[in-house]
């Protein structure tokens, strides 16, 4: 059974000092673009996201074309491919269909890297107990989701975001909707969360080269 909220016995965690917010979601059937916070709110810290293999940088999106910090990250992480996508009704072909597809719970066989250049959006990820965590992305936020993690994406109520998509090598956009537990990358990801990888096994990419603290 998928779990989407937590009981009151869990302590509240501090929010991010750099403005990135994440929280456990409620089970409401309201519009997916709404915040879906629990009442009271249950925040998720940057350290807790790191334990799931989710990493974050704060950059200056106004200088992304010439930003040496972005170039350093791309070099260190091996992000050789880059393109930019604008998600807005008048700009994205098949807008409604794409939003529905993005919000289907899925995984990828490679890391997912997104850098918000303008606007806002949400990434939702599953924690170790299969509970939804919502990550609020704003201008200047760069996030990496590890291969094998179940997740989904949606705009918020502003209905607009512009994002840079980064990839190691040639991009592979294929998404595998849940259930996808038989994939080797999913099994390795779950094992990494449980600390049960065997000798010689490789972790999902994100856990190998974490970013510096922000």
Image (spheres, rainbow, N blue to C red):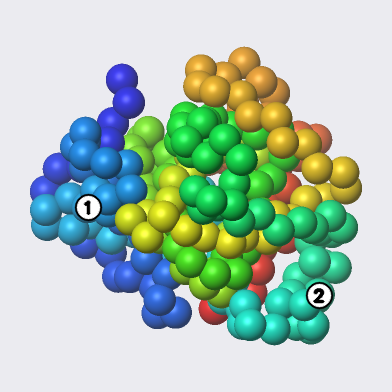
The one nearer the camera, 205 or 180, is: 180
Say what secondary structure mark 1 lies in. Answer: loop
Q: Residue at x 62, y 16 (%)?
A: 182
Q: Residue at x 37, y 60 (%)?
A: 158
Label annotation for residue 71: 2
Q: Quick check: 48 left or right of 163?
A: left
Q: Residue at x 48, y 66 (%)?
A: 119
Residue 109 in sight: yes
Badge 2: few (under 14), some or many (20 or more) residues near its Cα, within 10 Å?
some
| Left or right position of 161 against 158 | right
The residue to which callout 1 is attached is: 37
Q: Residue 185's spot in the image, x, y percent?
A: 68, 30
Looking at the rendered image, the quarter that the N terminus falls into is top left
> Given the current orientation, which residue lies at the most extreme front position?
90
Task: Give the residue displayed 65% in from the left and 39% down from the top.
Answer: 147
The CA span between labels 1 and 2 is: 35 Å
Residue 148, position as x, y percentages in the image: 61, 34
Residue 180 image offset from top left, x and y in percent:
57, 19
Q: Classify residue 20 as left or right of residue 78.
A: left
Determine whether 18 is above or below 156 in the image: below
Q: State the image quarter where residue 183 is shown.
A: top right
Count how many numbered circles sit on residues in the image: 2
Query: Of marks 1 and 2, which one's residue comes earlier in the chain?
Result: 1
**Rendering quarter of residue 203:** top right
The percent position of residue 165, horizontal first and vertical second, equals: 70, 55
Q: Is residue 181 above or below residue 14?
A: above
Which quarter of the figure has residue 19?
bottom left
């Amino acid at each position: 059974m998928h779990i989407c909220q937590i009981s009151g016995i869990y302590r509240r965690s501090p929010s991010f000092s750099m403005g990135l917010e994440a929280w456990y979601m409620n089970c409401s059937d309201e519009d997916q673009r709404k915040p879906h916070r629990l009442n009271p709110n249950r925040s998720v810290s940057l350290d807790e996201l790191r334990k799931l293999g989710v990493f974050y940088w704060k950059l200056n999106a106004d200088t992304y074309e010439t930003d040496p910090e972005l170039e350093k990250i791309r070099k260190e992480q091996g992000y050789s491919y880059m393109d930019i996508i604008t998600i807005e009704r008048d700009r994205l072909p098949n807008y409604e269909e794409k939003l529905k597809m993005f919000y289907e719970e899925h995984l990828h066989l490679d890391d997912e890297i997104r850098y918000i250049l303008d606007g806002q959006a949400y990434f939702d990820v599953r924690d170790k107990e299969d509970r939804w965590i919502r990550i609020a992305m704003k201008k200047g936020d760069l996030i990496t989701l590890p291969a094998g993690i179940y997740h989904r994406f949606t705009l918020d109520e502003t209905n607009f975001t512009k994002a840079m998509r980064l990839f190691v090598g040639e991009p592979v956009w294929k998404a595998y909707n849940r259930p996808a537990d038989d994939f080797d990358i999913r099994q390795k990801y779950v094992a990494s969360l449980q600390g049960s990888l065997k000798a010689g096994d490789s972790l999902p990419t994100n856990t190998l080269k974490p970013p510096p603290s922000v």
